[in-house]
Image (cartoon, helix red, strand yellow):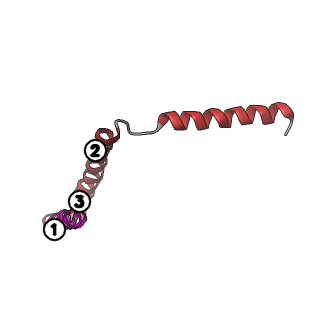
Amino acid sequence: MNRGAFSSIEAAWQNVFELCSYISTIIFSHPEQFQWPCLLSVIAVYTAGVIYAVFVRRRRGHLLHLSRWMILRAREDGLQKVASSSGV
């Protein structure tokens, strides 16, 4: 049930924003006005990214698994040092 509700809401939002793109095409129909729909698109993408980052931060408590990344990086650095000192 939750999956169907989520899909329905997602499809509804997708349709709303598709209608917004059609409206912006009607409003900015001249080629010299093309920068405005482009700007609206860039703003929408960055806004979606920020909203998703806030969602992930609230859900997980962090955005990146830095501790795992730092451990892997330290291992790689250590292996490179061993390889360079042994002449491999």
Spatial CA distance of label 3 from label 1 is 13 Å
**Distance between the alpha carbons at the discs numbered 2 and 3:** 27 Å
Asked which secondary structure carries label 2, the reply is helix
Q: Which residue is mark 2?
A: 55
Point out the tag, 3 or 1, that comes first from the N-terminus.
1
| Magenta stretch bounds | 3-23
Mark 3: few, some, or many residues within 10 Å (few <14, many ≥20)?
A: some
Nearer-N-terminus badge (2/1): 1
Give the number of the disc on residue 19.
1
Label 1: few (<14), some (14–19) or many (≥20) C-alpha neighbours in 10 Å: few
Counting from the top left corner in percent of width and height, residue 23 is at 14, 66
Say which of 21 and 27 sits in front.
21
The amino acid beneath tag 2 is Phe
- The residue tagged 3 is 37
Q: Position of residue 6 (x, y in %)?
A: 22, 62
The amino acid at mark 3 is Pro
Q: Find numbered disc 3 in the image and state the secondary structure of the residue it sits on.
A: helix
**Which is more toward the observer, 7 or 54?**
7
Residue 52 higher or lower than 38, as above or below: above
Q: Quadrant of the N terminus?
A: bottom left
Residue at 25 percent across and 61 percent down: it is: 34
Q: Where residue 80 appears, x then y in whole percent?
A: 73, 36
* Quarter holding residue 4: bottom left
